Amino acid sequence: MKRRAALPFALAFALSACSSTLWMSAPPCLRGPVPEVGRPVPDEMFALMRRERDRAERASPLVRAHILETIPRLFPDVSDLLLAPPCDEELEAESAAAFDEKPLPFSRLLVARIRTVHDAEILMALAKRDEASITEYQLSPDEPGPRPPKSFVRYLALASIPVYWVVTNVPEGRRLLLDRVRTSKDAREQLLLHGATSSVYSWMFWGHPERAEGEEGPALLRASLPEIKRRLEGPADAASLELVLLQINDLGAYGVRFGLEREARALVNEILAAKGEVPLTRGIPGAARDLAEVARAALFDLDTPQKSTSAPDLPRPRREQIDVQAELRYVEPAGRKVPEAAALARVRELDAELEKLRFNAPRCYVLNELGHWMPPAEASRRFDAFIAPIFEGERIRLDTESVCRMDVALGLNGVDEARRVKLLEKLLTAKPEQVGPRDRSRDEHHPAIAYPADEQPLWSVAASALLVHPEWIERHAEVRTWLEQQALAPIPSDSATAQVWTYFQPSFERVITFHASGAPGASMETARAILRGYMQPLDPTMQKLIAYIYFGEVSRARMRALGDYGKLVGLVPEVTAYLEERKTDRTATVALHMLNL
């Protein structure tokens, strides 16, 4: 009895000890005193965030909108604290309050507010909003146009909804999204909603991947068939093409298990018979080959029992791919033409911040903003000073700020290409002894934060720059020489470098194309040597690495390259023999088809 009596007493004592905490509320984030949590990096970010908000209130409409949508990068992750300032929630509530206006003023500021909202209910209400209740887009003085259509509001709201999560967790949201999937004929809208159909398909196999339960998934996939056929026979359109490729990929992954094998086979065989040359792909470079590749992969999936709950990733495109999500979330909707004086005023504000900020996270925010606002002439004038902190004599300083400076500097389009490529070459060719040890003294430190033990930040930055500027490969022999050496080498055995190789693969293939082109300095033998290297058997000690995600990804990319370039460099018999030996492998089967296309 004494023990039982003691239990309520102990509970009451514990609750009384916590009572002061239970009745406290989190300190505000966006108003009142600047938040402080007693940790130097978050506190510096909070202070910079508040100064940026003050500047936004005084800025031109376009600058204000830009600051508003970038400010969340200055919300530090202090979620480990019991009473963390609710920055995201306050900004979201502030933005959502503006959506109640009637009519809804459509401007750059509204776009920024939608981009800061993540609440699915609020976004779905915007997606349903009648366009008649929205004004025409109000251009600011810094926007040259053209004005985006009112449908931009609906698209942006849909792009901001976490559709996969909503479909699996919010019944009303699921109903709304799937109703739009069933009724919308708009390719862009269907692209934004594809995650909703993917969610339905995946959940039908949860716990039993070899068989589907229910009719919702099969009904959605069956309904897509006439739409795929209509779009294939329709005019060339980038959004429709992206949608069709995703839907054909779904047919391969789920067609047999959804009872649609006959219809799916008929469709993909028609595409393969036409070699991807259909009205939808005409006039879009690389589109026919991309369509044929996805169709052949779908046929392999129909022939092979599928056990995955999700569809495979689409292959890297040859066409110029549109990214509807990225366009809506990050691109200026009506262009940008800020007067140089206004841009320089913003630059001076940012310069003043760099003079007093101490830690990497807020400093990187400022460096990225400088890259965004520096006029071309200013960027060119300051380039050498901007990259100087990266170096200690001939050694490269390796800390978070230096990596940020590298990334921003390579993207400064106002700077002469040769100067940027010189920096790129230093990053590519630096020997280990020329790179200082990783310094994290100005990063956030906390028991909940873990930094990677192995990384390749210099090569990651360089690979990203080459994805944006692939033309540098043809124009600069030293860049090409470095890429040749790496392309000829075996796949790196460590995970960090193998991961970076996945980013470099398009550049390696650009080297193959260059050497097969007959251009001055090109060597067909180099192109052949690279592809022959791709066919070399793995060292037995490397066999176990094939299961590593990045090692396997690079292996598949190299096998795909054999199908793309084997004919171009005159190695069809060798490549055919190599791929025939591996024709039970999905990538090899598709590559063999592409080799002979």
Image (tube, rainbow, N blue to C red):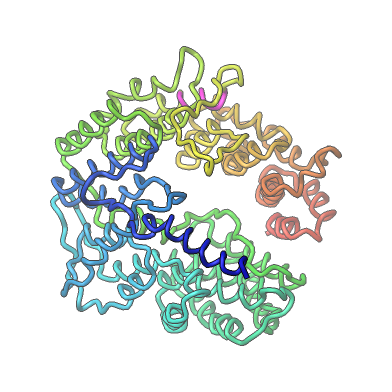
Find residue 215 and report its horizontal and vertical position in percent: 61, 87
Looking at the picture, does residue 219 appear above or below residue 196? below
Find residue 174 and report its horizontal and vertical position in percent: 47, 79
Find residue 11 and report its horizontal and vertical position in percent: 51, 63
> Residue placed at 54% from the left, 20% from the top?
436
> Residue placed at 33% from the left, 74% from the top?
127
Task: Tell me which segment is drawn in magenta.
Answer: 423-429
Looking at the picture, does residue 376 appear above or below residue 159? above
User: Which quadrant would residue 540 be assigned to in this image?
Assistant: top right
Which image quarter is the N terminus in? bottom right
Which image quarter is the C terminus in? bottom right
Q: In this view, does 572 lie to the left or right of 101?
A: right
Q: Nearer the viewer, residue 197 or 332?
A: 197
Camera sees residue 193:
yes
Q: Nearer the viewer, residue 415 or 343?
A: 343
> Residue placed at 43% from the left, 78% from the top?
173
Q: Which of 538 and 528 is in front in this view?
A: 538
Q: Nearer the viewer, residue 378 or 84?
A: 84
Give the overall secondary structure of the magenta segment: helix
Looking at the picture, does residue 61 appear above or below residue 516? below
Q: Is residue 427 magenta?
A: yes
Q: Is residue 252 magenta?
A: no
Find residue 112 and report its horizontal and vertical position in percent: 27, 57
Camera sees residue 236:
no
User: Which quadrant would residue 118 be assigned to in this image?
Assistant: bottom left
